[in-house]
Amino acid sequence: MPDFTKPEALHLMKILLPFWLALFSLLPSCHPPIAARQGSLTENSKEAPGKPYLLLISCDGFRWDYVERFQPQRLKDFIAKGVAAESMIPCYPSKTFPNHFSIATGMYPDHHGLVDNSFYSPNKKAEYRTRDREKVEDGSWYGGTPIWVQATKSGMVTASYFFVGSEADVQGIRPTYYHQYDGSVSNDDRVDAVLDWLKLPEKQRPHLITLYFSDMDDVGHRYGPHADEQLREALLKLDESLGRLFDGISATGLPVTTIIVSDHGMYAVPVDQLIATETVEDDDRYRTVSNGALIHFYLHDGVDKAAVFHDLKEKENHFRVYYTEEVPYFETPPTSENWGDIMAIPDAGWYFASQRTIGLRKTGGQKEIGEHGYDPGIKDLQGIFYANGPSIQKGLRIGSFKNIHVYPFMCKILGIDIPENVDGDLNILQGVLK
Ligand code: AMP
Ligand code: ZN
Ligand code: ZN
């Protein structure tokens, strides 16, 4: 600890003065300050003022039918004065990381490379895991051009209070302000930070903000998608935070368009329908990476693929084994090596777990939990798309659509170019715009 009475320490404080001032100007005014990290571009370009503001909110695991079932008032008002889709269809697999990144890039997981929450890359000879900070923050795992990267390239300041990929240096670019993921930050602190960003002077004010809430996914996993009481309680609480956010945005008077999405829905899994992952492992012949609703098998060099396939096939019991190219749920034929050579997919409502987890579940007293990752064509696995703001039609209801189409829609709202290699198509949501 420096002694601040010493002249050298005073001198040090003086040289650092501009840094302290910059830091304090970013801190929210009336709640525990959580300083944002500083990413790329620091000021909007000369063209950016006058351009719209876009807020992308993801509510993890928010199933398409929750608003109808639980009647959250603020969300209902938001929808009534904006646009709602019947549901938003995830990409396969209906897991968090691939789908958030499909929303962020407009690409299928096969094309952006984040094929699952955890997977092995034969090319990198390494495993990606959502809890592995080094991998999560390493931009070389992420293909495509996330919307904040595209906005940055167009000279716009961007900000993120969490979003899959936002902590990584994708193409060397991070949002101007971003946070390392920390699920313990309260929703209200996240909301306050977003409102503070919108109050920044125009030059530093982000034109694109992403925000993420995990509540509905947490509760959906824990109690299952039939647990009305717990789901309602969580949703009404989230609705309060959203209401505070909506009010705060109105108070700024800024032309902010808000899009609320989710990555997937939730499927009921009875706890006696858990399958032990150990039964399909064979470390001598292949690497196994399980995500519960799907398992990836990566064969060691020289191992006979047909023989492994045959042996796994013999074990089928409430799950099916496929050569990766024959998995029936892909939107386009798989090209990424990250899927593995062979995959095992349980029937919807069955789930792979370790023997240890199965033991704990059995003694836990709970009969049913919630999981996702299965075929996105099943309605229970589908999520939400709601939008409201100056560029959005009022009172419009649209049919279900695939989440890759949100990206070109966001580019259009921000007035920035749509990269050529995206899978999403602007025509799908064009009619939602005024
Ligand atoms: P899932 O396992 O598919 O249910 O993933 C949901 C979980 O992903 C959330 O509960 C968070 O803990 C985690 N998560 C969401 N965003 C991030 C992130 N940016 N970095 C690390 N973990 C995240
Ligand atoms: Zn999720
Ligand atoms: Zn989940």
Image (spheres, rainbow, N blue to C red):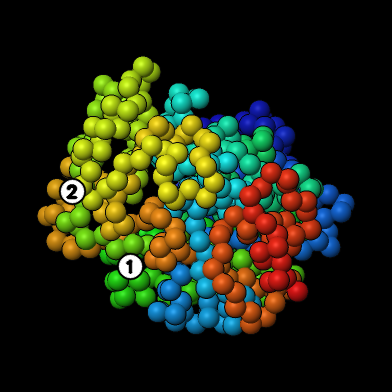
- Image side of residue 367 versus residue 256, left or right: left
Q: Residue at coordinates 35% horizontally, 40% vertically from top-left?
A: 322
SS category of the residue bearing label 1: loop
Image coords of residue 13 (percent x, y): 67, 37
Q: Residues within 10 Å of mark 1 (few under 14, many from 20)?
A: many
N-terminal of the pair, mark 1 or mark 2, is 1
Residue 379 or 48: which is nearer the viewer? 379
Residue 159 in sight in this render: no
Q: Residue at coordinates 37% horizontally, 29% vertically from top-left?
A: 298
- Residue that numbered label 2 is attached to: 358
Residue 225's disc is 1
- Image side of residue 370 versus residue 434, left or right: left
Residue 354 or 401: which is nearer the viewer? 401
Image coords of residue 169 (percent x, y): 62, 37
Residue type, numbered disc 1 = Pro
SS category of the residue bearing label 2: helix
Residue type, numbered disc 2 = Ile
Q: Is residue 189 above or below residue 226?
A: above
- Check contact, mark 1 vs mark 2: CB within 8 A: no
